[in-house]
Image: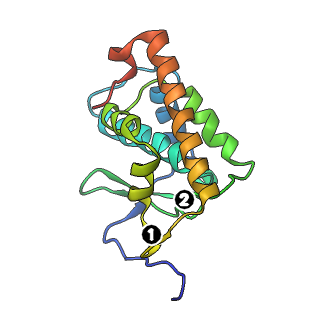
Amino acid sequence: LVPGARIDWIEGLEVLGLESEPLRGRWRGWLLDDAPLTDADRPLAAQIATMIVFDSLAGNWDRWSGANVGFLPAKSELVLIDNDGAFLPKAPPPMERQRELMRGLRVFPQALVDAIRLLDDASMQRAVGEERPGVPLLSEAAMRGLAERRLTVLEAVDARVKAVGAAKAFAFP
C-alpha cells in the first residue's frame, strides 16, 4: 500500500474567495450577524453554513488558510477542497478560528444537524470506515476527537435554539 491522495480534475471549478472582501463581509453578515438574506443569496449561505458545521465536526482547521473552497458556477455549488487538515488526533491551534465560527453561527442546516444528532460511536466508526479489513481508518484518539467535536457542534446549535427558537435557528433545510 502507498498512502496518497487522488485528485480528480473538476471541469469548470473556480476558487471562491470566501476569505476576501466583498464576499467575506457578505457571508459573515448572513451567517454571523443576522444580516438580511435574499432568496438569491440563500443557497450559497446554506452551503457555507453546512461547510462550517461539517468542518467543525471533522476538525478541519485549515479551511480558511486560502483558496480551499471551490465553486461550480454551472451548478451554483460549493466544492470543499484541501481537506487534509481534518480528522487529526489533536487539532492544532489554528482550529480555534473554526471553533469561533461555529460558536458564532446564527443559522444552521437542519438536515445536517439532525444527522449529527443520530451519530454515536459505532455509527461514526462505520462512516469513517477501515483502512483495510479489520483496521480502522482513524486512530482511537482521532475518533475520540470526532466524538468530542460532535458534542461541541451540538452544544453550539442547542445554545442558539434556546436563544432564538428552532424556527429561526434552522433557517436552512
Q: Which residue is mark 1?
A: 130
* Upstream in sequence: badge 2 or badge 1: 2
Residue depicted at 52% across the width and 58% down the height: 68
Where does residue 89 sit, x and y in percent of width and height?
65, 57
Q: Is residue 149 visible?
A: yes
Q: Amino acid at mark 2?
A: Ala
Q: Quadrant of the C terminus?
A: top left
* Neighbour tally class for label 1: few under 14, some 14-19, many 20 plus, Cα within 10 Å: few
Determine the CA span between mark 2 and mark 1: 30 Å
Residue depicted at 60% across the width and 49% down the height: 144
> Tag 1, which secondary structure?
strand
Where residue 129 sits, quadrant-wise, is bottom left
* Neighbour tally class for label 2: few under 14, some 14-19, many 20 plus, Cα within 10 Å: some
Q: Is residue 109 above or below residue 98?
A: above
Q: Which residue is mark 2?
A: 67
Residue depicted at 35% across the width and 36% down the height: 46
> Tag 2, which secondary structure?
loop
Where residue 74 sits, quadrant-wise, is bottom left
Q: Is residue 65 above or below residue 31?
A: below
The foreground one among 58 and 20 is 58
Which residue, as the protein is rendered here, is positioned at the far right? 93
Point out the frontmost of discs 2 and 1. Answer: 1
Q: Amino acid at mark 1?
A: Glu
Where does residue 158 sit, x and y in percent of width and height?
48, 21
Which residue, as the protein is rendered here, is positioned at the far bottom? 1
Q: Is residue 21 visible?
A: no
